[in-house]
Image: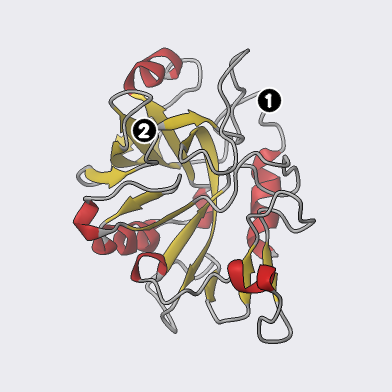
């Protein structure tokens, strides 16, 4: 898939630099602490080597049980608590951003940002025992098997009517049980409800974010508790 090629390119050389050198677009999420299910999001652009805020910040919701270190472009601390499948925690770190999925025929977006209109045959597999774990599968037939029905991306659920992939534990190096199906999507009940690990926001803010993303700028998502952000800001060259 096209967007996975972008992720692979971003991962090359990640050990030397957390945020890739070609990245000039960065979405930052700051939470109060590890147990928080709320974060403030801010989009930044880099100009003349300096990060500059793009527009105003906005609220989002995180996992019901807070956060844990994820698998992305960043190195994890020794003995870090890592995200696991089903732990209701959002992954912390620096992550590439992939494609967009939705129910609309078309959406407002950059011409090079991949968009897939979700049908009943589009699956996202969350079973750690599956060879397709944390990958999209497109069936050639309508879902028949129980696992196919369970993995359907289209569930007639308004919260998942628009989704932007966060490359946590993403191909080509997917860790069994390391957490799957992490997206930005629309929040529930106006932000009153936390998530199972995704980052959610108001629909209009998600659409605005997607419209601003430029694949040529190598956009990434940084999610950290505020103390960790202060700790890693200089070393990781964060906004």
Quarter residue 233 falls in: top left
Can you give x and y, in whole percent of width and height, for residue 134 in the image? Answer: 66, 53
The one of 204 and 5 positioned closer to us in this rendering: 204
Can you give x and y, in whole percent of width and height, for residue 209 in the image? Answer: 34, 56
Tell me the residue that label 1 is attached to: 15
Callout 2 secondary element: strand
Rendered-image quadrant of the N terminus: bottom right
Numbered circle sitting on residue 140: none
Look at the image and name its color scheme. secondary structure
Task: Name the residue furthest right.
Answer: 131
The answer for how far apart the CA atoms under marks 2 and 1 are is: 21 Å
Q: Is residue 1 above or below residue 195?
A: below
Q: In this view, does 157 lie above or below 163?
A: below
Callout 1 secondary element: loop
- Residue pictured at 20% horizontal, 57% vertical: 190
Label 2 vs 1, first from the N-terminus: 1
Please name which of the two marks, 2 or 1, marks the residue nearer to the observer: 1
Can you give x and y, in whole percent of width and height, for residue 56 in the image? Answer: 19, 44
Tell me the residue that label 2 is attached to: 51
- Residue pictured at 71% horizontal, 86% vertical: 141
């Amino acid at each position: 898939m096209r967007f996975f090629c972008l992720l692979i390119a971003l991962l090359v050389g990640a050990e030397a630099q957390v945020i890739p050198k070609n990245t000039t677009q960065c979405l930052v999420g700051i939470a109060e602490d590890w147990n928080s299910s709320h974060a403030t999001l801010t989009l930044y652009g880099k100009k003349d080597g300096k990060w500059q805020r793009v527009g105003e910040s906005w609220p989002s919701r995180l996992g019901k049980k807070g956060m844990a270190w994820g698998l992305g472009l960043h190195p994890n601390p020794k003995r870090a608590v890592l995200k696991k499948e089903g732990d209701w925690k959002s992954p912390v770190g620096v992550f590439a951003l992939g494609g967009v999925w939705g129910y609309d025929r078309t959406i407002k977006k950059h011409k090079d940002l991949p968009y897939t209109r979700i049908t009943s045959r589009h699956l996202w597999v969350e079973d750690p025992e599956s060879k397709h774990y944390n990958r999209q599968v497109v069936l050639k037939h309508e879902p028949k098997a129980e696992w196919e029905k369970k993995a359907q991306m289209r569930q007639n659920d308004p919260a998942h009517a628009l989704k932007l992939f966060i490359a946590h534990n993403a191909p080509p190096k997917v860790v069994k049980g390391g957490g799957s199906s992490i997206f930005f999507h629309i929040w529930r009940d106006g932000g009153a409800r936390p998530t199972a690990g995704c980052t959610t926001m108001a629909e209009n803010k998600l659409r605005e974010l997607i419209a601003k993303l430029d694949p040529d700028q190598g956009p990434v998502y940084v999610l950290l508790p505020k103390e960790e952000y202060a700790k890693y800001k200089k070393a990781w060259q964060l906004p």
